[in-house]
Image (spheres, rainbow, N blue to C red):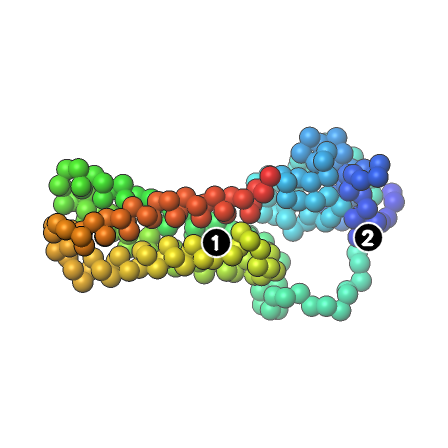
Amino acid sequence: MKEMDTEELKRMNGKDGKPVCIAFGGKVYDVSQSPHWNTGVHMARHASGQDFTVEMEVAPHGAEVLDKFPQVGILRKSPPSGHPRAEPQFLQKAFDRYPLLRRQPHPMTVHFPIAFLMATPLFFILYALTGNNSFEATSFYMLCLGALGSAGAIATGFFAWWVNYGAVLTTYVKYKILLSIVLCGIAGVLVIWRTLDPLLIIQSGSLWWMYAIFIFSLAPLVSLLGHLGGRMVFPG
C-alpha cells in the first residue's frame, strides 16, 4: 500500500481532479463518495487532506464511519519541525491521555448559564403577572447561578479559544468576548443590586422598571451569544 506524507495528503482535497482523502490512525481513506465530504469540506468546517486522528476522539461519531470507505494509503509520520506546540508540556500530556479535555470543557459549562439566565426573565414575568413572591425569589436564584456560571463559561471559553483556535481574534470571537463580558457584568450588577436593596422588587417607579429592563435584556444577549457560538462551530 502506498505511503504518503502530510504534504501529499494535503493535495488529496478534491481539487483539480484529486480524490477527497483524510487520515485516521496512520491510515489514509478515500471519502470522495461520502455526501458529507464530496465538497472537500465536512460540516463547512473540516477541510480534507488532513489527519483527523485527534479530532475523531471528540467527534459525535466514532471511527467506524470510515469502515465503509476504501483505505488508499498509509500516512508516513513527518519528522519533528522543531517548533514546539503552544501548550505547556503538562497540557500536551493531558490532551494526549484525555482528548476530551481539548474541546469539551466549554460546551459542558456554557449550557448552565444559558439555562439559568434564560429562566431569570421568565420567572420575573411570572412574578410581575401574579405578584407571587416565590416566582421573584426563583428568578433571583436563577440570576445568581447564571452570573456564577457565565464567569466559568468565559474562563473555559478563553481556554478553548487559545487551545483550539490559536487565540486568533476573529470577528466572531471579538463579538463573543465583548457580549460575554457585558452579559456577565449585567448579571453581576443585578445580583449585587438586588442583594443590597431587597425591597427593590416591591417598590414602584423608575428603579423597579430599570431593574426589570436589565432582567429582560438577559434573554436576547444569551440568544445572540448562542448564535455566534453556533456560527463558529457550524459556519455553514
Mark number for residue 67? none
> Is 28 displayed left or right of 135 in the figure?
right
Outermost residue to the front: 206
Residue nearest the viewer, comparing 219 with 47: 219
Q: Residues within 10 Å of mark 1 (few under 14, many from 20)?
A: many
Q: What residue appears at the point 12 percent right and 49 percent down from the top-left corner? A: 204
- Kindly tell me whether residue 231 is visible in this rendering: yes
Q: Vertical placement of 88 versus 68: above or below?
A: below
Question: How far is mark 1 from mark 2, CA to CA?
Answer: 35 Å
Q: Quadrant of residue 199?
A: bottom left
Q: How crowded is mark 2: few (under 14 residues within 10 Å), some or many (20 or more)?
A: few
Q: Mark 1 points at which residue?
A: 176
Q: What residue appears at the point 60 percent right and 69 percent down from the top-left corner? A: 88
Q: Which circle's residue, 1 or 2, is located before the other in the chain? A: 2
Q: Vertical placement of 166 versus 45: above or below?
A: below
Q: What residue appears at the point 72 percent right and 68 percent down from the top-left corner? A: 83
Residue 69 location, x and y as percent? 75, 34
Q: What element carries label 1?
A: helix
